[in-house]
Image (cartoon, rainbow, N blue to C red):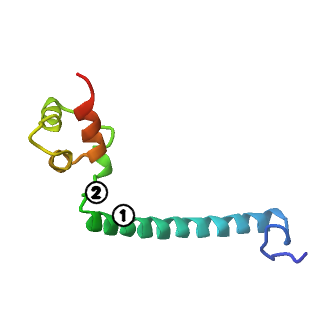
């Protein structure tokens, strides 16, 4: 075992080296999280463009439905996708609201 050698199973286990290894691993994890967030965001945008479905901003999730939104969601002259696009809600949310008993 060499002092200063980074490693989980083989390496120095003194407090200084353990802290340095922990800091190094946290830095790697943070960089990977950022990299994957960007990659997943790009994949989501590509999927939405190919499927023709608009991405719903996360702010719209879990917001209470207004009376006007419920009226639009239950309008039989609109398709579920059209109503979802008008309301910035997912088609699944509009469908659930449309077919829910009053």
Q: Residue at x 25, y 58 (%)?
A: 53
How many numbered callouts? 2
Which element type, helix, strand or loop, lies under badge 1? helix
Q: Residue furthest left?
A: 77
- Residue 44: image x %, image y %? 36, 64
- Residue behind mark 2: 55
Q: Is residue 30 above or below residue 66?
A: below
Relative to 87, 58 lies left or right: right
Which residue is at the front of the view, 82 or 61? 82
Q: Is residue 68 above or below residue 91?
A: above
Relative to 79, 90 lies left or right: right
Which residue is at the front of the view, 43 or 102? 102
- Residue 39: image x %, image y %? 43, 70
- Residue 47: image x %, image y %? 33, 65
Which residue is at the front of the view, 95 or 35? 95
- Residue behind mark 1: 44
Between discs 2 and 1, the one toward the N terminus: 1
Quadrant of image for the N terminus = bottom right
Relative to 2, 39 lies left or right: left
Q: Is residue 4 visible?
A: yes
Q: Residue furthest right?
A: 1
Q: Residue at x 66, y 70 (%)?
A: 24
Q: Residue at x 15, y 49 (%)?
A: 82
Mark seen at residue 36: none
- Residue 33: image x %, image y %? 52, 64
Q: Do the CB atoms of the residues marked 2 and 1 lie less than 8 Å apart?
A: yes
Which element type, helix, strand or loop, lies under badge 2? loop
**For residue 71, which quarter of the picture?**
top left
């Amino acid at each position: 075992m060499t002092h200063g050698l980074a490693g989980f199973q083989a390496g120095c286990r003194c407090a200084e080296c353990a802290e340095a290894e922990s800091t190094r691993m946290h830095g790697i994890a943070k960089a990977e999280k950022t990299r994957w967030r960007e990659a997943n965001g790009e994949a989501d945008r590509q999927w939405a463009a190919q499927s023709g479905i608009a991405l719903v901003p996360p702010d719209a999730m879990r917001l209470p439905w207004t009376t006007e939104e419920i009226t639009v969601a239950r309008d039989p002259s609109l398709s579920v996708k059209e109503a979802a696009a008008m309301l910035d809600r997912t088609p699944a949310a509009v469908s659930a609201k449309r077919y829910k008993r009053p």
